[in-house]
Image (cartoon, rainbow, N blue to C red):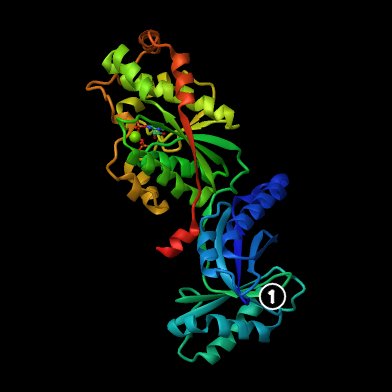
Amino acid sequence: MNEIFLMKLGEIVLKGQNKKQFENKLRQNVRRRMKPFGEFDVYILQSTVYVQPMNDSCDVEGAWEACHYIFGVVSLCRCRPCQKDLDSIFQAVEAYLGDDLDCAQSFKVESKRSDKSFPLTSIGISQEIGGRLAEAHPHLKVDVHHPAYTVYVEVRDLAAYVHGPAEPGAGGLPTGVGGRAAVLLSGGIDSPVAAYMIAKRGVELECVHFFSYPYTSEQAKEKVLELARLVTRYCGRMTVNVVGFTAIQEAIRDKCPEEYFTLIMRRFMMRISQRIAQMHGCKCLVTGENLGQVASQTMEAMGVTAAVVDLPIFTPLIGMDKEEIVTIARRIGTLETSILPYEDCCTVFTPKHPKTKPNLKEVERVESVLDVEALIAEALEHTDKATVRYDESADAEL
Ligand code: ATP
Ligand code: MG
């Protein structure tokens, strides 16, 4: 199999003493992600992950696609490995990139020599290979400033590698190096983006979804599971804890003043999420809250909501404009599902005039008519778990 993927590590390179641990995690993640595509050798040398198909039955296209969704990788390229001598390098460029060169008007060669025992400098390699290519393709102009195509030559420890332009990777840190977080996942646009942003920092996710059947439908739940599944394309397998929330919402509706419905409901969400987080070793809660977006997302309202938990609440979208959030949702592929028109429990019993500047003491007073502990216990009893994972082969069949 004469092709290999080289993936450049992102911030891991800056990690000093923890670098080894980060690299090990990344290698483990890449190995796991390559499994559905056949037998691949995965190793890390000189801040680069090598992914090498081991036989002809490997699904190289599927593996290549999946590599774009692995956190910890800044850029990646498909390469042809060859012997470390100029003739072999030139032949590899001709055989592997010749068609691309034929379609271009101008080109340059950019070389990197990490094997310092190689007799030519990087500039020397570029000049030599560039000269031979210009001769072999008379229509091609050398243009070192604005080339239509760039040939890359990397002379590394094990071999030389030739490739065309690299593609951007998923960025971030390898999944698993940043601990675990519990994400409050609704069916909206925001929370899947928040989940993705925290996952990108190397964090494993446990999802919590509040479900108010029959006020919200089975389809609304399926939509949330689908959103979770889309996020797992980046972060791997996740569990969604689907919490039966109906009894709590009905109790609030029956016993509390209408303008406090949403606030008290959100305090229950936080308390229950914290319990679930603690059961699964999660050290923070994550929401898709965004300052000023709705009545429950003013500073005062968020303060009242956060007052019932001790874990830090991370809100990665807090300062973003809707348009910026939508752009990310579109890029990561959750937008289309998010805008399907199913209801969320937040839209059930929505007050006409919600409190936007609530006072904590007042909220605690109106909430005190409820048996908070009993309601939480009941909701936890009515919690189902669903495991979601991204099925790459399902994509291939589409
Ligand atoms: P989203 O687009 O994520 O639904 P939103 O702008 O609609 O957010 P809210 O409905 O006020 O805002 O919810 C704020 C945050 O609370 C959500 O981003 C999510 O983290 C959490 N949340 C809301 N509803 C639910 C739910 N049914 N289950 C779990 N978490 C929820
Ligand atoms: Mg919502």
Q: Residue at x 37, y 8 (%)?
A: 369
Q: Is 336 left or right of 64, judged from the image as shown?
A: left
Tell me the crowding category of disc 1: few under 14, some 14 to 19, or many 20 or more residues within 10 angstroms, Cα based.
some
Pick the quarter of the image with the N terminus.
Answer: bottom right
Is ligand 1 closer than 8 angstroms to the Cβ of mark 1? no
Q: Quadrant of the C terminus?
A: bottom left
Q: Residue beneath label 1, please?
A: 121
Whether residue 397 sits left or right of residue 171 in the image: it is: left
Q: Secondary structure at mark 1?
A: loop
Give coordinates of residue 115: x percent, y percent: 73, 70
Q: Tell me how many marks there are.
A: 1
Rendered position, 77 above or below 250: below
| Vertical arrangement, residue 81 with respect to residue 296, above or below | below
Image coordinates of residue 287 in percent, x first then y, are: 44, 33
Foreground pick, 356 / 192: 192
Residue 42 shows up from this direction:
yes
Q: Position of residue 261 (x, y in %)?
A: 31, 19
Question: Residue furthest toward the left?
Answer: 352
**Residue 224 against residue 145 in the figure, above or below:** above
Say which quarter of the image contains residue 368: top left
Give the amino acid at mark 1: Thr
Taking the image as four quarters, which one is ligand 2 found in? Answer: top left
Where residue 90 sits: x, y (%)?
62, 84
Residue at left offset 67%, top offset 58%: 47
